[in-house]
Image (cartoon, rainbow, N blue to C red):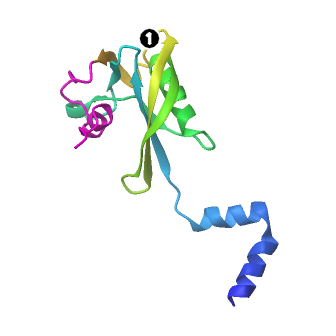
């Protein structure tokens, strides 16, 4: 039986195999976060309009679109939300999240642009020292900004 299944699978070839895999497996939403810093080491935080008022401050965050490289998602989301341009850096987090959500975070360096907020999503943008972060910052984002001290 196993040999028959393997032969049938191999006879299907590329596109049909991919379609069957797609139908058989869970679909995930990919949330991508950018830990955007300037050349002085300050971090860009946004006060998000659609987040809870108690925890509205956070890093630039958005969802990847189909086929998009996650590092490019950071570039696109920061540009859409703030008008700033960034260069993505190291991957700093990859984990499964709530239900079918995958969470990805990259370091990023602000390289230019002019601050112009997408006021549908963002109320305010400010640069903060990692040692002086605002109240109302999501704890998961605080962890990304100030990683735990090495033991």
Q: Is residue 1 above or below residue 36?
A: below
| Residue sitting nearer the eye, 130 or 54 | 130
Residue at left offset 72%, top offset 80%: 6
Q: Magenta segment, which residues?
A: 129-151
| Residue sitting nearer the eye, 118 or 105 | 105
> Hey, which residue is sitting farthest bottom in the picture?
1
> Hey, which residue is sitting farthest front in the picture?
151
Q: Is residue 132 left or right of residue 48?
A: left
Q: Position of residue 110 (x, y in %)?
A: 46, 18
Q: Is residue 139 magenta?
A: yes
Secondary structure at badge 1 equals loop
Image quadrant in which the C terminus is located:
top left
Q: Is residue 96 above or below residue 121?
A: below
Q: Residues within 10 Å of mark 1 (few under 14, many from 20)?
A: some
Q: Is residue 136 left or right of residue 67?
A: left
Overall secondary structure of the magenta section:
loop
Residue at left offset 74%, top offset 75%: 9
Q: Quadrant of residue 71?
A: top right
Q: Quadrant of residue 13?
A: bottom right
Residue at left offset 79%, top offset 70%: 12
Q: Is residue 136 left or right of residue 62?
A: left
Question: Disc 1 designates what residue?
Answer: 115
């Amino acid at each position: 039986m196993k040999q028959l299944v393997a032969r049938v699978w191999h006879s299907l070839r590329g596109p049909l195999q991919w379609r069957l895999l797609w139908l058989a497996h869970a679909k995930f939403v990919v949330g991508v976060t950018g830990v955007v810093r300037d050349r002085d080491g300050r971090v860009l935080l946004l006060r998000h309009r659609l987040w809870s008022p108690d925890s509205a401050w956070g890093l630039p965050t958005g969802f990847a679109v189909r086929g998009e490289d996650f590092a490019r998602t950071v570039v696109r989301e920061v540009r859409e939300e703030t008008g700033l341009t960034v260069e993505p850096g190291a991957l700093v987090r990859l984990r499964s999240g709530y239900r079918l959500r995958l969470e990805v975070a990259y370091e990023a360096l602000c390289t230019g642009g002019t601050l112009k907020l997408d006021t549908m999503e963002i109320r305010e943008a400010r640069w903060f020292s990692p040692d002086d972060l605002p109240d109302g910052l999501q704890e998961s984002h605080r962890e990304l900004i100030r990683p735990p001290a090495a033991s």
